[in-house]
Amino acid sequence: MVLKTFGWSFAVTALGLVAAVFYGGWTAFGIVAILSVLEISLSFDNAVVNAGILKKMNAFWQKIFLTIGILIAVFGMRLVFPVVIVAISAQLGPIEAVDLALTDKDRYQELVTDAHPSIAAFGGMFLLMIFLDFIFEDRDIKWLGWLERPLAKLGKIDMLSVCISLIVLLIAATTFGANAHQHGGAHADKAQTVLLAGIAGLITYMIVGGLSGYFEDRLEEEEEREHEEEEKAAREGKPKSAIALAGKAAFFMFLYLEVLDASFSFDGVIGAFAITNDIVLMALGLGIGAMYVRSLTVYLVRQGTLDDYVYLEHGAHYAIGALAVILLVTIQYEINEIITGLIGVVLIGWSFWSSVRRNRALAAAEGEAGTKTEVTSGV
């Protein structure tokens, strides 16, 4: 099971490390290995959240997620995205941007760093909306009940998550703008850039998340209707419409997953510059890490881990909330990637341990109930 799920990841790791040795010797090998670990540690919460969405999709779309999806993740976000950012920021053509990335790495890093505020604002707002929509939803299973119960009541207010997100964005943009003016006029227009990028992130979430949610609801309604009419043998044409609807639902959920993965990858791409500014080594290291995150997502789905450890999804969403805040803070202040990764690991580890304790408590309660039943039967 492990080899089947992680086989491609192992193969890509071997190829990537060999390519690194040929490209830059053993120093490059070490850098790629470090970047791979960095990407996995920063994106473990991504795998847990992805698994919660992917488990609703059939085997075909899971394969699409691991094939076409990984091409988008590795080549799109880890290789093309930084170059596109540089091309837009420096108003260069795509070929010139690639040439700059390969020949003038210091200038390339400087341009990506300059674009960081807009990247952080877009990704931060997208992830913040995911977190807020999660905590404001009234769920049967609650992890931190003392916090989640009152938040679920507040969640009955329409558009609350959007309002809070916009307030947070305004604070981030105006705070950055004030600091920028204090340091001179060079970055004085960054407040507007942050505001526009943040709104773009919010709109992207609402469009992609809204469409995926709409088609998912339609799919569930259609399945319920079909189930009710099975006994009446009136299903002529319904299987086709259900399949078509499933295709639409799966497509938009896949699109949502890709945007989600993109938002998660922002901190990894930016953090990678603390280790190297070589675009080739970044693509190799982050690409290997992205493969493991994808494989881990599928593994969690096939093993039913989220069903067995019910608080994992909660922990991952709290980690998303923390990452959203960190991204917005990094618009002005630098935060070490180790802190970012540790916060996610701690929250997910805590939720996993809480799930284990819950399972033990339930098993003990069932054992006691079974003993009482036996005693009563004996009497």
Image: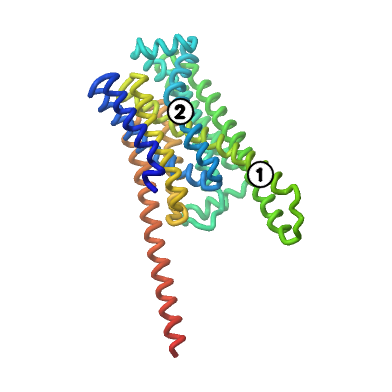
Describe the element under mark 2 as helix, strand or loop. helix
Residue 332 image-quadrant placement: top left
Query: Looking at numbered disc 2 in the image, what kind of residue is underneath it?
Result: Ala
Q: Is residue 24 left or right of residue 211?
A: left
Quadrant, the C terminus? bottom left
Q: Nearer the viewer, residue 337 or 278?
A: 278
Q: Is residue 286 left or right of residue 90?
A: left
Determine the residue located farthest toward the left in the rendered image.
Answer: 26
Give the residue drawn at x 51%, y 44%: 54
Sequence-earlier tag: 1 or 2: 2
| Mark 1 vs mark 2, CA separation in Å | 38 Å
Q: Nearer the viewer, residue 82 or 301?
A: 301
The residue wearing badge 1 is: 243
Q: Position of residue 133 (x, y in %)?
A: 55, 44
Crowd band around label 1 with a 10 angstrom C-alpha radius: few (<14), some (14–19), many (20+): few
The residue wearing badge 2 is: 120
